[in-house]
Amino acid sequence: MKKLSYFLLAALVSAGLSADAQMQRGNVLIGGNLANINLGLDEPNVFSAQITPKAAWFVQDNIALGGYVEFGIQTAKNSTTTTNYGVGALGRYYTGADVEVLRHGRIFGEANIGFGGQNVSDGGGNTNGINFGLGPGFAYFVTPNIGLEALLKYNGLAGFGSTNYQNSLNLSFGLQIYLPGRGTASKVRGDIR
Protein backbone atom coordinates (compact mmCIF):
# COMPACT_ATOMS: atom_id res chain seq x y z
CA MET A 1 0.00 0.00 0.00
CA LYS A 2 2.87 2.36 0.82
CA LYS A 3 4.42 1.82 -2.63
CA LEU A 4 1.08 2.58 -4.27
CA SER A 5 0.77 5.87 -2.36
CA TYR A 6 4.30 6.90 -3.43
CA PHE A 7 3.44 6.05 -7.03
CA LEU A 8 0.23 8.09 -6.89
CA LEU A 9 2.11 11.00 -5.31
CA ALA A 10 4.71 10.89 -8.09
CA ALA A 11 1.95 10.80 -10.73
CA LEU A 12 0.22 13.81 -9.14
CA VAL A 13 3.50 15.73 -8.98
CA SER A 14 4.14 14.99 -12.65
CA ALA A 15 0.64 15.98 -13.70
CA GLY A 16 0.57 19.08 -11.51
CA LEU A 17 3.60 20.85 -12.93
CA SER A 18 3.15 23.45 -15.65
CA ALA A 19 5.61 24.52 -18.35
CA ASP A 20 7.03 27.11 -15.94
CA ALA A 21 7.43 24.68 -13.04
CA GLN A 22 10.16 22.56 -14.65
CA MET A 23 12.70 25.34 -14.26
CA GLN A 24 12.02 26.17 -10.60
CA ARG A 25 14.78 26.34 -8.02
CA GLY A 26 15.50 22.92 -6.52
CA ASN A 27 14.30 20.86 -9.49
CA VAL A 28 16.57 18.43 -11.33
CA LEU A 29 17.27 17.94 -15.05
CA ILE A 30 18.41 14.49 -16.25
CA GLY A 31 18.84 13.38 -19.84
CA GLY A 32 21.17 13.49 -22.76
CA ASN A 33 21.82 14.50 -26.34
CA LEU A 34 22.60 12.48 -29.46
CA ALA A 35 24.63 13.97 -32.28
CA ASN A 36 26.21 13.01 -35.58
CA ILE A 37 24.33 9.75 -36.00
CA ASN A 38 25.44 8.42 -39.38
CA LEU A 39 25.36 4.95 -40.89
CA GLY A 40 26.85 5.04 -44.37
CA LEU A 41 25.32 2.52 -46.75
CA ASP A 42 27.80 3.16 -49.58
CA GLU A 43 31.55 2.60 -49.51
CA PRO A 44 33.48 3.24 -47.26
CA ASN A 45 30.61 2.36 -44.85
CA VAL A 46 31.10 5.17 -42.35
CA PHE A 47 29.53 4.90 -38.90
CA SER A 48 29.51 7.79 -36.44
CA ALA A 49 27.65 8.63 -33.24
CA GLN A 50 28.06 10.82 -30.18
CA ILE A 51 26.16 10.64 -26.88
CA THR A 52 26.25 13.18 -24.05
CA PRO A 53 24.45 12.29 -20.80
CA LYS A 54 23.72 15.33 -18.57
CA ALA A 55 22.46 16.10 -15.06
CA ALA A 56 21.84 19.57 -13.62
CA TRP A 57 20.19 21.21 -10.62
CA PHE A 58 18.22 24.43 -10.78
CA VAL A 59 20.06 26.75 -8.38
CA GLN A 60 17.60 29.54 -9.22
CA ASP A 61 14.50 29.72 -11.36
CA ASN A 62 15.59 29.25 -15.01
CA ILE A 63 19.28 28.67 -14.10
CA ALA A 64 20.70 25.13 -13.95
CA LEU A 65 24.24 24.01 -13.10
CA GLY A 66 25.50 20.45 -13.43
CA GLY A 67 27.78 18.10 -15.28
CA TYR A 68 28.10 16.06 -18.46
CA VAL A 69 29.96 13.09 -19.88
CA GLU A 70 30.61 12.77 -23.62
CA PHE A 71 31.60 9.87 -25.82
CA GLY A 72 31.76 9.75 -29.61
CA ILE A 73 33.15 7.51 -32.30
CA GLN A 74 33.60 7.70 -36.08
CA THR A 75 34.88 4.78 -38.04
CA ALA A 76 34.96 3.57 -41.63
CA LYS A 77 35.88 0.32 -43.32
CA ASN A 78 39.65 0.20 -44.06
CA SER A 79 40.17 3.65 -42.50
CA THR A 80 41.07 5.35 -39.24
CA THR A 81 38.83 5.51 -36.17
CA THR A 82 38.24 8.79 -34.35
CA THR A 83 37.26 8.71 -30.67
CA ASN A 84 35.95 11.75 -28.74
CA TYR A 85 35.53 11.91 -24.99
CA GLY A 86 34.93 14.53 -22.33
CA VAL A 87 33.73 15.22 -18.80
CA GLY A 88 33.00 18.57 -17.18
CA ALA A 89 30.62 21.20 -15.88
CA LEU A 90 27.68 22.77 -17.70
CA GLY A 91 25.35 25.68 -17.17
CA ARG A 92 21.98 26.52 -18.69
CA TYR A 93 19.83 29.63 -18.74
CA TYR A 94 16.19 29.32 -19.84
CA THR A 95 14.27 32.34 -21.07
CA GLY A 96 11.15 33.29 -19.16
CA ALA A 97 7.60 32.49 -20.23
CA ASP A 98 7.40 35.97 -21.82
CA VAL A 99 9.78 34.77 -24.59
CA GLU A 100 7.81 31.58 -25.28
CA VAL A 101 8.11 30.69 -28.99
CA LEU A 102 5.58 27.86 -28.91
CA ARG A 103 2.99 27.22 -26.24
CA HIS A 104 5.03 24.41 -24.65
CA GLY A 105 8.51 25.48 -25.72
CA ARG A 106 11.42 27.37 -24.19
CA ILE A 107 14.62 28.84 -25.62
CA PHE A 108 17.80 28.24 -23.61
CA GLY A 109 21.52 28.85 -23.77
CA GLU A 110 24.06 26.23 -22.73
CA ALA A 111 27.76 26.56 -21.93
CA ASN A 112 30.23 23.90 -20.81
CA ILE A 113 33.87 23.55 -19.85
CA GLY A 114 35.82 20.46 -18.92
CA PHE A 115 38.53 17.98 -19.86
CA GLY A 116 38.32 16.12 -23.15
CA GLY A 117 40.07 14.75 -26.15
CA GLN A 118 39.85 13.69 -29.76
CA ASN A 119 42.12 10.85 -30.81
CA VAL A 120 42.55 9.44 -34.32
CA SER A 121 44.00 5.96 -34.76
CA ASP A 122 47.02 5.22 -36.98
CA GLY A 123 48.88 8.47 -36.35
CA GLY A 124 46.08 10.95 -37.03
CA GLY A 125 45.70 14.32 -35.28
CA ASN A 126 45.27 13.96 -31.53
CA THR A 127 44.27 16.65 -29.03
CA ASN A 128 43.74 16.21 -25.29
CA GLY A 129 43.06 19.14 -22.99
CA ILE A 130 40.36 21.68 -22.18
CA ASN A 131 37.10 21.40 -24.08
CA PHE A 132 34.42 24.07 -24.08
CA GLY A 133 31.17 24.84 -25.84
CA LEU A 134 28.52 27.51 -26.16
CA GLY A 135 25.24 27.69 -28.01
CA PRO A 136 21.48 28.21 -28.13
CA GLY A 137 18.85 25.52 -27.87
CA PHE A 138 15.12 24.95 -27.89
CA ALA A 139 13.17 22.62 -25.58
CA TYR A 140 9.65 21.49 -26.51
CA PHE A 141 7.72 19.88 -23.65
CA VAL A 142 5.72 16.87 -24.86
CA THR A 143 4.54 16.39 -21.25
CA PRO A 144 4.96 18.73 -18.29
CA ASN A 145 8.17 16.89 -17.29
CA ILE A 146 9.68 15.65 -20.57
CA GLY A 147 11.36 17.95 -23.07
CA LEU A 148 12.62 17.20 -26.58
CA GLU A 149 15.55 19.43 -27.48
CA ALA A 150 17.56 20.75 -30.36
CA LEU A 151 20.93 22.35 -29.55
CA LEU A 152 23.26 24.18 -31.95
CA LYS A 153 26.64 24.49 -30.29
CA TYR A 154 30.16 25.68 -31.05
CA ASN A 155 32.67 23.25 -29.51
CA GLY A 156 36.36 23.90 -29.03
CA LEU A 157 39.19 21.71 -27.78
CA ALA A 158 42.53 23.27 -26.83
CA GLY A 159 45.43 21.33 -25.44
CA PHE A 160 48.31 19.08 -26.22
CA GLY A 161 48.99 16.53 -28.92
CA SER A 162 49.78 16.57 -32.62
CA THR A 163 47.01 19.17 -33.12
CA ASN A 164 46.81 22.02 -30.58
CA TYR A 165 43.28 23.23 -31.32
CA GLN A 166 40.19 21.66 -32.86
CA ASN A 167 36.71 23.16 -33.23
CA SER A 168 33.32 22.26 -34.67
CA LEU A 169 29.75 23.40 -34.99
CA ASN A 170 27.42 20.68 -33.79
CA LEU A 171 23.65 20.16 -34.06
CA SER A 172 22.32 17.64 -31.56
CA PHE A 173 18.93 16.39 -30.45
CA GLY A 174 18.08 15.24 -26.97
CA LEU A 175 15.58 14.19 -24.37
CA GLN A 176 15.55 15.74 -20.89
CA ILE A 177 13.44 14.78 -17.89
CA TYR A 178 12.65 17.50 -15.37
CA LEU A 179 12.15 16.07 -11.88
CA PRO A 180 10.65 18.03 -9.01
CA GLY A 181 12.91 18.83 -6.09
CA ARG A 182 12.00 18.27 -2.45
CA GLY A 183 10.38 21.69 -2.14
CA THR A 184 8.02 21.07 -5.04
CA ALA A 185 7.14 17.58 -3.79
CA SER A 186 6.41 18.99 -0.31
CA LYS A 187 4.08 21.62 -1.80
CA VAL A 188 2.17 18.94 -3.71
CA ARG A 189 1.92 16.73 -0.60
CA GLY A 190 0.55 19.74 1.32
CA ASP A 191 -2.04 20.40 -1.40
CA ILE A 192 -3.20 16.76 -1.33
CA ARG A 193 -3.95 16.81 2.41
Image (tube, helix red, strand yellow):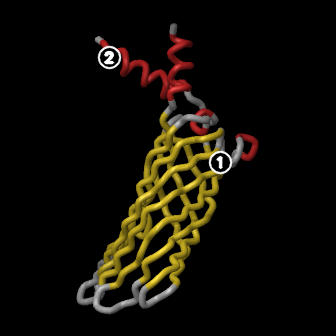
Q: Quadrant of the N terminus?
A: top left
Q: Nearer the viewer, residue 188 or 99?
A: 188
Q: Earlier in the sequence, mark 2 or mark 1?
A: 2
Taking the view exactly as shown, the residue that stands out farthest to the right is 98
- Quadrant housing residue 187: top right
Does the rendering let one see residue 72?
yes
Residue 13's place in the image compared with 189, above or below, is below
Residue 94's label in the rendered image is 1
Give me the residue at 60% from left, 31% from top: 18
Whether residue 143 appears in this view of the structure is: no
Q: In the structure shown, which secondary structural element does the residue marked by tag 2 occupy?
A: helix
Q: Residue at x 32, y 16 (%)?
A: 4
22 or 86: which is nearer to us?
86
Q: In the rendered image of this protein, does residue 33 appear above or below residue 65? A: below
Dot 1 crowding, Cα within 10 Å, few <14, some 14–19, many 20+: many
Q: Residue furthest top?
A: 193
Label 2 – label 1 distance at C-alpha: 34 Å
Question: What residue is drawn where x is 54% and y is 79%?
Answer: 167
The amino acid sitting under disc 1 is Tyr
Q: Dot 2 corresponds to which residue? A: 4
Q: Position of residue 68 (x, y in %)?
A: 45, 57
Image coordinates for residue 131, horizontal then vertical, percent: 51, 71
